[in-house]
Amino acid sequence: MRYAETGVNLEIDLSRGSIEKDQTDPELTKLYLGGQGTAVKILWDRVGPEVEPFSPDNLLIFSSGLLDGSAVSGANRTSVNSISPATHLMSHSLMGSYFGPEMKFAGYDKIIIRGKSPHLVYLWINNDKVEIRDARHLAGKGTRETGDLIRAELGQDKAQVAAIGPAGENRVFTASITHSDASAARGGAGAIMGDKRLKAIAIRGTKDIYFAKPAELFAFCMAARKEIMSRHEETEEVAREKGRSAVYQEMAKHRQQLGDWMATDEDDSFHHDNFAWGNARTRRKNYWNKELEERWRRLKFDNLSRQTGCFNCPKICHNVICIPGGQRFSYKCYAKDTFHMASFQELDFSYEMLPIAEEYGVDAYSTPQIIAFALELLEAGILTDKDFPGMPSDIRGRFHYLLDIIVRREGIGDILANGVYAAARQIGKGAENFDHNTTKKFEQIPIKLGKLNPAFFLMIATGEKMGITQIEGSFPQNPLPTAEEREAFVKEWVAPPDEKFKQYFLQWEKRDQITNQMACEIAEWNEMMHYLDDALGLCAFLSSFRGQFGGKVAYTIHNEPEIISMAAGINLDEKGLWEIGQRNRNLVRALNVRRGMRRKDERPPEDHWAVRNEESEQKLLSDYYAYRGWNEEGIPKAETLNKLGLDYVRKDFEDRGIL
Ligand code: SF4
């Protein structure tokens, strides 16, 4: 009997119209767990480096995490993996809500899409019954609208639907796949789905999932749930009363609120004072004030319909907004800020744009940046008014206009739809100089800081996950100013896999004062926890992203082996689990190395930090490569691959002359 997983992958070939159910090898689960872990193995085995993103041979893989559908709170992530049209490397996208658990209940761990349909179709998966259905009548429909229409058409109001909008149909490189109040938005997964002419997947499952030790697992989950909902005793208010520093208070605030309303919703000084506005250019350090906070609080609560969350998570962290006469939309965390910060407006403008962007199905992180980039080129005279026929003169009107032409790929919108990196090179005439926020050809979160944090340099330079928020999160971003505060923090910090990290934090006084060795270990730990979450299906806000704020964290390297044992019957210790994380991480790197990624690609945006030093950054990068067992080009060495059981990768590299 298979525990925690179904042991079946659904294989759909849209060129041939075939539907197959493949039994999977349980040994692979022991090596890679599930979710993205096993998805990468499939991409490695079946999508060679010669396969272009828009080739019928490219795969689009929906994976439920190993713990999805269990009693483990927050285990609900679906990873969506493919080869990205923007980067030609592996695309990494995760979505929450209900899709992954529903896949398990229908009897499938993965849905693997291959080929291209001759016309628009959708999949209807109702337990064992799987159909490819005509979707031509859904062409041009928005993402939520598509879900509603499909549920009505099927007479299945409980079906979970993941759909693309017009952006995906038009293969916009920032197109997302939207499901409920979540989306797989990074890396252009929606463009791949659109290229395959797959409008949506609707799924309904009513089967059981089996667990190795169900009673023990349930008892553990009930206790963990209580902890997830408990409040830490040193609240932000208590910290303030005790005279703690502003950084400490900020950590205390997040410790309380992360997983509730992400990153403190109404007091959003963090994003507004620290992140860059416009085309990732301008920092407005003292922008935030109490008057704004009050105005934005009113705007939110006057229009808040309700809060929703994901499958089996008590932290209902999505705000659902419904402005009278407008389209319902939802957001969490920084997603509410991207449009108004890119356009130097206020929150009401994001409230205006988000419902439209959600229906079009675009990544709300990258798309506003592309629009701001286009307007910067216009201001610089690289693009002219002729490139924008009929564009309004006001900034809000311009954002609407540009979003429309990008989604429809009309005129200059056809070039902008390829993302900033590609568009800058297509436009030429110096436009490349305005591409200042991409790494590995992909738009990054617009952060501009003063002094470089060496661990963050490594994570941004070498990360392959299309966003720092999917890499960082275990070790705090900033030091605390006093020894007393550091000691108070460390006393209750449960996440570190090793006591040395507590010592590092206790000694850390200035952001850039981290030795290369410390930076290497911190970067590795941060990244490793995300790779494990992505295989298990855990929400990072209860695990890998949360450790940085201290206190208790629901899931860490210390309790995950026991959870896996109770759920899947796979017996591991911390060392064994860490090794799986290493294997999964190195396999992603190998896949991208085979597709041409090298050291030259591992550069954070040039103006990401004000103070830079090329020589010491390159030394740090070399030290990190050596620490990870990679050569000077960032390629995993033969002994690293052999040690991790990736000897098939080593052989492939040798055959191709990569090693
Ligand atoms: S913390 Fe929020 S995003 Fe994460 S699983 Fe819970 S409801 Fe979903």
Image (spheres, rainbow, N blue to C red):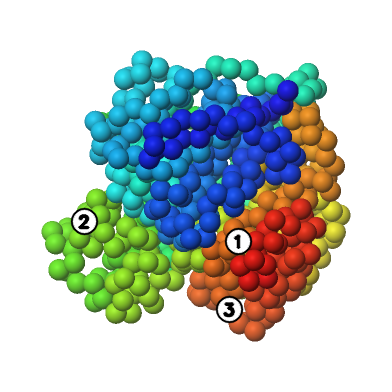
What residue do we see at 53% from left, 26% from top? 102
Q: In the rendered image of this protein, does residue 335 appear above or below residue 130? A: below
| Residue type at the position of mark 1 | Gly
Q: Earlier in the sequence, mark 2 or mark 3?
A: 2
Let me know if residue 129 appears in the view.
Answer: yes
Q: Nearer the viewer, residue 118 or 585?
A: 118
| Disc number placed over residue 410 in the picture, else none | 2
Circle 2 packing at 10 Å, graded few (<14), some (14-19), many (20+), is: some
| Residue type at the position of mark 3 | Val
Quick check: 216 left or right of 651? right
What residue do we see at 64% from left, 74% from top? 633
Query: For disc 3, does the CB lie below 8 Å from ligand 1?
Result: no
As helix, strand or loop, the secondary structure at mark 1 comes to loop
Quick check: 238 left or right of 605? right
Q: Which residue corresponds to mark 1? A: 463
Q: Quadrant of residue 617?
A: bottom right
Q: Which residue corresponds to mark 3? A: 611
In this view, the residue farthest toward the bottom is 615
Q: Nearer the viewer, residue 611 or 213?
A: 213
Give the Cα distance between marks 2 and 3.
Answer: 40 Å
